[in-house]
């Protein structure tokens, strides 16, 4: 148990609909990351937060994607006007305090299927 | 853009055999991690290596970091069905994020 809860675990939606994923770390973590993983690939970086500040966004994060971490604890990732190419596993990960060492602790992911 | 190449992409061997998988980059890593992922789950950290030439052991798994810190290998001795999964290497290149390889999908046949 990494202490990172993601919801929902699975989401099936029709193209054009909006979806929102939530990531809840059990304890306080100053850095929180979102990754996307498609079948047969490794996770790809989307964005990360230092407390409530969003510090970096990947070019993969089109203007249909928005992520927030309003109180520096849980985070949401919203995809508007979903497309079939958005089908993937969306992974949330946290880092404990201190210098970044690359040690990420992932949640179980939210799998999105866009029909 | 830093790229991590993993080989082989797929590996299927009999229980009890040994195997090695590889991770290579054209850039120098500040640190490198190996993760293991099972279907429908998030990746789980196995090990971090930082120093060139470093060797770490985790039971039957041996991780080696290249002297130049641009490559790494994972060796499994006497593979067991429980070792089945997707093995991902991930590199940190001095910034605040990890770049993952495409993974090696390992299947151990009982």
Image: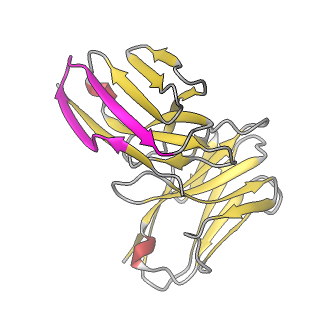
| A18 vs B89: above or below | below
Whether residue A1 is visible here, answered yes or no, is: no
Q: Relative to residue A71, is residue B1 drawn left or right?
A: left
Residue B25: image x %, image y %? 46, 43
- The quadrant in which the N terminus of chain A is found is top right
Residue drawn at x 48%, y 45% is: B26
Quadrant for residue B59, please give it: top left
Asked whether residue B11 is drawn in magenta, I would say yes
The x, y position of residue A111, in whole percent, is 45, 60
In-front residue for pair B18/A87 = B18
Name the residue at 48% across, 33% down: B34
* Foreground residue among B72 and B88: B72
The C terminus of chain A sits in image quarter: bottom left
Give coordinates of residue A70: x percent, y percent.
80, 63
- Magenta-highlighted residues: B6-26
Q: Check the image and report above or below for A29 versus B15.
A: below
């Amino acid at each position: 148990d990494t202490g990172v809860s993601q919801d929902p675990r699975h989401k099936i939606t029709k193209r054009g609909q909006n979806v929102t994923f939530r990531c809840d770390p059990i304890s306080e973590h100053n850095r929180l990351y979102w990754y996307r993983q498609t079948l047969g690939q490794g996770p790809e970086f989307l964005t990360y937060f230092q407390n409530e500040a969003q510090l970096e966004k990947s070019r993969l994060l089109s203007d249909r994607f928005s992520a927030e971490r309003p109180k520096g604890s849980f985070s949401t990732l919203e995809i508007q006007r979903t497309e079939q190419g958005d089908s993937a596993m969306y992974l949330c990960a946290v880092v404990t305090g201190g210098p970044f060492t690359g040690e990420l602790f992932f949640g179980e992911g939210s799998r999105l299927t866009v029909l | 853009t830093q790229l991590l190449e993993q080989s082989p992409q797929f590996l299927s061997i009999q229980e009890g055999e040994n195997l090695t998988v590889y991770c290579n980059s054209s850039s120098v890593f500040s640190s490198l991690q190996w993760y293991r992922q099972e279907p429908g789950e998030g990746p789980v950290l196995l090990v971090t290596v930082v120093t060139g030439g470093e060797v770490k052991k985790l039971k039957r798994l041996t991780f080696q970091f290249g002297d130049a810190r641009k490559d790494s290998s994972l060796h499994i001795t006497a593979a067991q069905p429980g070792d089945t999964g997707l093995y991902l290497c991930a590199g940190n290149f001095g910034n605040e994020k990890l770049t993952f390889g495409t993974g090696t999908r390992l299947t151990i046949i009982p």
